[in-house]
Image (cartoon, rainbow, N blue to C red):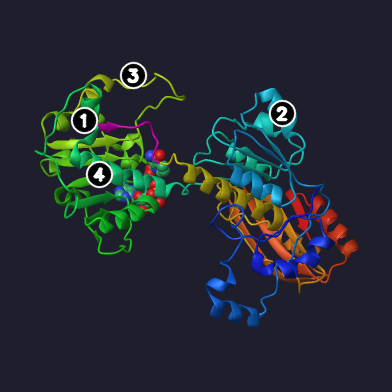
């Protein structure tokens, strides 16, 4: 195992001794940036005053924690996960095995046996059968948005935390929508298609600037809010509708009803999740409420728009254009599979003018893939090195602030257990002879997760704590970091 690498340049000198002392993974990083900078604050020359203030405050350096009773951390990365993640995980000193493709079930079972972590995308199915073969697995990173390829409940019940990256592609979606607003207003996909066929059709009727027009955003979350800022910077007015009261960015204005938004907006764009309440939330009545000659954009989920109703509204000229990136049924792979067999309305839809159809590419950019790599990579490192489950999709979310180099003779206890009465009493009896510096416990369904920092422990105490916790009847997984 190679020595862990410290990426936080500001603290690197303070860390050097610790690196020599321990081969355990590094616990220090911060969000954002490329793999080589992801842990770094801006160089101090950017903010000299702040840098000297920080230096005079002498913040104690985070301590490197070393796993007790565990060999070197082994990680299996499948499906060509982004290099940003590969480099981050390697820089922690983990043993990383990287594969460009997914593996068939037998190969997967063979490979998963000894690893502590696995990184996958959407093609690898982590079923109970596969995971049951893993002897050391503690964490799964889904380097994508969806997590239904993993049996989340089974994983949680066996102490395996699962992380994904739901919001790393928000900017990519927002930018695509901006492109679509202009493309629709200028009918430029039609002009481009015509010219591909040798037809010169120079028209200005029905083509508009977007400056001064109103954008109606339905769902003012990660994507909707980004879009709001971009649209205003191009001279649009923004109104938005959300089930939650959300503070507006810039001059955007929240409206009380979807109907109000439909009546005010020149462009309606949808950014809500797929929920029973959002199914067909844009159907005939909402389309009727929209302005004559307005536009509809859906880059959220395919269930949100009633497509036969949209076809009618386009045919009558009620809508001047529309753009769809998502559909009720989408092909599982690339190829000529988007047809009537998949969605009965394909024929009439495909014949409409000024209709942009894209194959669910809203979040598909190099930047989004890299951001997903960094976000999930960080989550894996945070869990392995510190025990933090913030952002886990199947686990109670628990975190404690880092131990520092000043915290000597400490052990961090990570204890996943069944959520039944009496656990805390038993665990605190085990801790009783030591000082509990901090402790946090949270439950989710049948499982609970406790993190505690215990001080005044020596090597023998750590062994004893571990053995006692392992023997408790509620134990699912015990990890100690010191
Ligand atoms: N096309 C793509 O490639 C692509 C990529 C990423 C995300 N998405 C989809 O975009 C959508 C939005 O993503 P996000 O990251 O902004 O989500 P988000 O959770 O950050 O925001 C969703 C917003 O919708 C609001 N909302 C929920 N139900 C509502 C309702 N009935 N009426 C009005 N508002 C409602 C929520 O309060 C929230 O503010 C999701 O469906 C997501 O799956 C698509």
Residue denoted by label 4: 181
Q: Nearer the viewer, residue 180 or 132?
A: 180
Q: Is mark 3 within 8 Å of ligand 1?
A: no
Q: Which mark is residue 339?
A: 3
* Depicted 39 relative to depicted 313: above or below: below
Q: Is residue 466 left or right of residue 104?
A: right
Magenta stretch in the rendered image = 355-362
Residue denoted by label 2: 109
Distance in Å between CA atoms under marks 2 and 1: 50 Å
User: Can you give x and y, in whole percent of width and height, for residue 206 in the image?
Assistant: 11, 39
Ranked by sequence position, the earlier of labels 3 and 4 is: 4
Ranked by sequence position, the earlier of labels 4 and 1 is: 4
Q: Is residue 302 left or right of residue 374?
A: left
User: Can you give x and y, in whole percent of width and height, for residue 2 in the image?
Assistant: 79, 50
Q: Main secondary structure of the magenta part?
A: loop
User: Can you give x and y, in whole percent of width and height, for residue 64 in the image?
Assistant: 75, 62
């Amino acid at each position: 195992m190679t020595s862990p690498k410290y990426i936080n340049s500001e603290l690197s000198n303070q860390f050097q001794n610790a690196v020599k002392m321990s081969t355990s993974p590094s616990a220090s990083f911060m969000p954002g940036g490329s793999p080589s900078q992801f842990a770094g604050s801006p160089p101090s020359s950017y903010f000299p005053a702040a840098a000297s203030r920080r230096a005079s405050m002498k913040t104690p350096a985070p301590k490197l924690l070393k796993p007790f009773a565990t060999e070197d951390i082994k990680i299996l990365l499948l499906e060509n996960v982004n290099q940003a993640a590969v480099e981050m995980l390697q820089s922690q000193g983990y043993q990383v095995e990287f594969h460009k493709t997914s593996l068939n079930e037998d190969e997967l079972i063979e490979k998963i046996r000894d690893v502590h972590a696995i990184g996958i995308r959407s093609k690898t199915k982590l079923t109970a059968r596969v995971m049951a073969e893993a002897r050391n697995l503690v964490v799964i990173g889904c380097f994508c948005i969806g997590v239904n390829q993993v049996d989340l409940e089974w994983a949680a019940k066996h102490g395996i935390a699962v992380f994904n990256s739901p919001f790393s592609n928000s900017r990519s979606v927002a930018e695509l929508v901006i492109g679509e607003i202009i493309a629709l207003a200028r009918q430029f996909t039609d002009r481009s298609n015509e010219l591909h066929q040798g037809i010169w059709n120079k028209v200005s009727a029905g083509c508009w600037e977007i400056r001064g027009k109103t954008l109606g955003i339905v769902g003012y979350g990660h994507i909707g809010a980004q879009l709001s800022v971009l649209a205003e910077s191009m001279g649009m007015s923004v109104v938005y509708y959300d089930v939650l009261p959300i503070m507006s960015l810039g001059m955007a204005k929240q409206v009380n009803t979807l109907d109000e938004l439909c009546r005010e907006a020149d462009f309606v764009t949808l950014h809500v999740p797929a929920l029973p309440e959002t199914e067909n939330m844009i159907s005939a009545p909402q389309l009727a409420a929209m302005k004559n000659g307005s536009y509809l954009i859906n880059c959220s989920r395919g269930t949100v728009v009633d497509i036969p109703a949209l076809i009618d509204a386009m045919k009558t000229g009620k809508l001047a254009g529309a753009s769809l990136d998502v559909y009720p049924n989408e092909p599982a792979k690339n190829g000529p599979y988007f047809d009537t067999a998949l969605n009965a309305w394909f024929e009439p839809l495909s014949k409409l003018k000024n209709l942009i159809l894209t194959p669910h590419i809203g979040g598909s950019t190099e930047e989004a893939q890299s951001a997903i790599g960094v976000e999930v990579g960080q989550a894996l490192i945070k869990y392995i090195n510190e025990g933090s489950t913030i952002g886990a999709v199947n686990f109670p979310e628990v975190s404690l602030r880092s131990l520092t180099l000043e915290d000597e003779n400490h052990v961090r206890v990570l204890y996943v257990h069944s959520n039944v009465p009496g656990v805390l009493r038993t665990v605190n009896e085990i801790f009783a002879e030591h000082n509990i510096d901090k402790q946090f416990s949270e439950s989710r369904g049948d499982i609970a997760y406790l993190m505690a920092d215990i001080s005044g422990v020596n090597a023998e105490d750590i062994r004893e704590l571990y053995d006692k916790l392992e023997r408790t009847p509620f134990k699912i997984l015990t990890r100690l970091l010191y």
